[in-house]
Image (cartoon, helix red, strand yellow):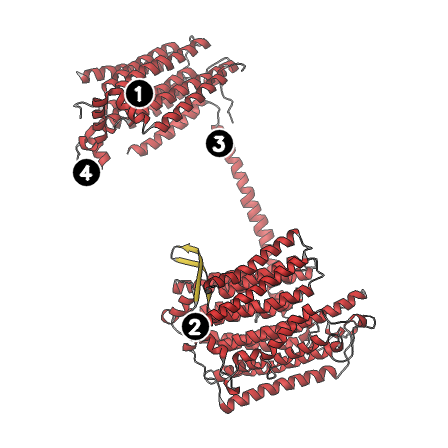
Amino acid sequence: MPENTFLGPSLALSAILFSLGVAGVLLRRNAIVLFMCVELMLNAVNLAFIALAQFHGAGGQIMVLFVMTVAAAEAAVGLAIILAIFRHTQSVDLQNINLLRG
Amino acid sequence: MAAFVFYLFAAAAVLGAAMCVLQRNPVASAMWLMSTMFSLAAIFILLGAELIGILQVLVYVGAILVVFLFVIMLLNVARTSSDLRGPASLGATVVVAGLLVVELAALWQYTPRRLAADIAQAPAFADPARVFAAGAAARQATAAQGVVGALAAPLFQTYLVPFEVTSVLLLAAIIGAVVLAKRNI
Amino acid sequence: MHLTHMVWLAVALPVAGFLVNGALALWRPQAKTAVSVVGAGVLLAAFVVALGVFAGLSNDPSQAPVIVRLWSWLPVGRLKVDFAFQVDQLAAVMLLIVTGVSSLIHLFSIGYMREDPGYARYFSYLNLFVVFMLVLVLGSNFPVLFIGWEGVGLCSYLLIGFWFSDKVNADAGKKAFIMNRIGDFGFLVATFFIWRAFGNLDFAYVSEHAATTLAPGGAVVTAITLFLFLGCTGKSAQIPLYTWLPDAMAGPTPVSALIHAATMVTAGVYLVARTNVLFAMAPVSSAVVAGIGAVTALFAATIGLRQYDIKKVLAYSTVSQLGYMFLGAGTGAYASGIFHLATHAFFKALLFLGSGNVIHAMHQAYHATHSHEDAQDMRNMGGLRQYTPVTFWLMLIATLAIAGIPPFAGFFSKDEILAAAFARGADAPVYYVFYGMGVLAALLTAFYMARLMAMTFFGENRTGERERAHLHEAPWIMTGPLVVLGVLSVIGGAINLPPFIGGHAALEHWLEPVLEPGLRFSHLAMPTGSAEYVLVGAAVAIGVIGLWLGFRVTLGRSIPVARAAPPDRGFARVLSRKYYVDELYDALVVRPLVWLSRVVLWRGVDQRVVDGAAVNGAAVVSRLAGGGLRLLQTGQVGVYVVLFLVGAVWILRAVMR
């Protein structure tokens, strides 16, 4: 066991970053920035994985690899969607996108 | 020394994240996010995940954030008026994010000892070294096979099927991105 | 071949017949030769198998029942019901009767139904009926028996309404079905009680543990047996549920012979014999069984006196004879009940098939001259002796058998039942009353049978001038089975010859392993010596007197043809209208039920509550809820995210504790 694993501080940092990501998603209307905040949340989770991987073996780190892959895929598809929306409405402001209103 | 480095990068990461959320200009937001990711990469290395730290820089900073910047500039939405939501959203944000922080802050109290006790469901604090045999084994594997080898062996053995599925997912994402982004195919 | 294989083969053969004939009925209804070969062939084969089973069982010295577990059917908690067959001495006897009589009636049907467009359908139903009848007699526990019980009811319904394009026939089928439902309710309740008391539904288990589980004469065993008997009154057409059987004559005549005389309606007697230990432990229920049997025997016989439809006379006669069987079973003489069941199967099937020949001849005659007279009304017959001589002689044999004239089959069985009732009178005097009713019913039986014979075969012919030339005997395929049944009606008594003429009650000894648990509880000291001779003499005398009176009264005055007949008056009218029981049931049950359904259930419950409150109410609630909830659907992603995160925070709160 290494003398300092930073378990608690790492998890707390992960919590703070995740909450900041949530705050960003809630506060911003720009779809691209919103996406960046989602990436921030994914990173926060990655941090938790890494911190706990010190105790649970390589599985946590490998999971981070998968998260990164999925994040990359998500960014590609998501940004392509934003591109298509922008072409349609000339805006990335989510307030202008409300086709689903009941 | 290690503690100093950790808290330094932790502070940088929090600052970067906060600025990313608050900056009006998307390009600035992206830049602040990049600083957060660099800090996180440093922390990863500090936590013994050297390979992940490197990949964090390569994939997140090198690929994903660049794509973000590319799209921002492509759409030319860099100079916009503030896109922050109104006071109602601000209230909701404070409440929801505040509650989330309060809830997750409980994680601060986690020490390896306590985690071991929780996991072993032991009434007293157990010895983490014995509970987390997997972690110890991973460290031994790292010592024996090197950072990459210790990760590659389980990735291509235990996690082979998810790994292959992920490659299919990436392929689908590529095709999907092309189909969505291209005007006329 | 081992016994266990033969048992399932006996059931599988008619199943195969049903499937083949059913397929032919759907796709090749004109392939009548194939239908005949398959339909009758599987039954003959099943009869051979039944003979094998019987031989195998009689060679088995242990006399223990052979239980064939085919598969586990209902393994639910403590309830473990196997789909299993049980062959013991009683089941073997029933197996022989069912397959034997069925084979003969299938052969007869080849001739009788030859011109019918639904020929293949008819034989597929008939095969299916035999399947269920065999399941009924072979089932090793109450639920499996109940499959057969319900299945024969279904086939009865299908065959009563065989000519369903006529509404009267379809209604008769429905009536039989509904009346049987009431009885089935009793059967099911009894099954539930038995499950509650024993925790097991196997016949073997119940008869073995009844003595230790239940208190003799107690409330539980009385309730079980009374509910079982309610089932029997439905299936075996006893008071108060007998009214469906006369209406069931709407079906083809061979069906009446097979289902509504020889086999299905005797299922109730079989059930009482099967659960004899329970009935023996409940003297009150046994008295009820015997009483209902005696009253039904007398009541139905009086109605039979004034019926003009030849099949209706035989139908009431069947109800009456079934009453005899229950009198025997209720008295504790289960073997005598089964004995009468067997002989009755012979002579009543013979009577029905003979009446089928008569109707066949009458129908052909009327058909040839395009007349619309009633081919079943005895007032249109008369003097048929010279046109259908074979049928006449065979029906005469059956008449003598049912009237209890020695040495024909019915004499021995009926005499045994009456003697048993008389013997039981020593313990419980009410049985003397039952005995008296039985004797009176025997007199009436002889009378109405003589009336039937006299109106049909004697006197001058009333069919009509032109029609007379077309009257002729049925073909050999129809008379052949009758000859076999005639022989059985003569010598059938030999299976259980009483000791006083040198027999040794073979059937009774054969059934002893099955009936022994019941006999342990209520031993019956049969009369011997001079008392026995007096009883026998009285029975014979009554039969002879009844026959003589019947012929004399009927032939003593001229009979008008149906068209010109004056309506009955006085008590005769009450009899010919069947005591107005149908009208009574209609007024007491049917019309209140229709009123309840129409006014309360339809206009009230269905239209107001179900349609108004439930259906429209649900629509209104969904519309209001939708109108409210659509306000949440703003189209704004931010709102959705907030809602989603509120949920996430809430769940996290629960997880983090």
Q: Which of the pair B85/B35 is nearer the observer?
A: B35
Residue C648 at x, y percent in the picture: 36, 29
| Chain of the residue on which disc 3 is drawn | C
Pointer 4 with pointer 2, Cβ within 8 A: no
Kindly identify which numbered label has been placed on residue C629. 3
Residue C549 can be seen in this image? yes
Percent from the top left, x then y, of residue C536? Answer: 56, 87
- How many other residues sit within 10 Å of disc 1, few (<14), some (14-19) or many (≥20)? many
Question: Circle 4 is placed at which residue position?
Answer: B123
* Separation of marks 3 and 4 at Cα, in angstroms: 48 Å
Q: CA distance from mark 1 to mark 2?
A: 82 Å
Circle 1 chain: A
Instruction: Tell me which amino acid carries mark 2.
Output: Val
Task: Have a look at marks 3 and 2 and say if they share a chain.
Answer: yes
Q: Identity of the amino acid at label 1? A: Leu
> What residue is rendered at 27% in x and 22% in y?
B149
Q: Which picture quadrant has residue C410?
A: bottom right
Q: Secondary structure at mark 1?
A: helix
Give the SS element for disc 4: loop
Left or right: where C26 falls relative to C535:
right
Specify the label residue A17 is tagged with: 1
Q: Which label sits on residue C277? A: 2
Question: Looking at the image, do the residues carrying marks 3 and 2 touch, with CB atoms under 8 Å apart?
Answer: no
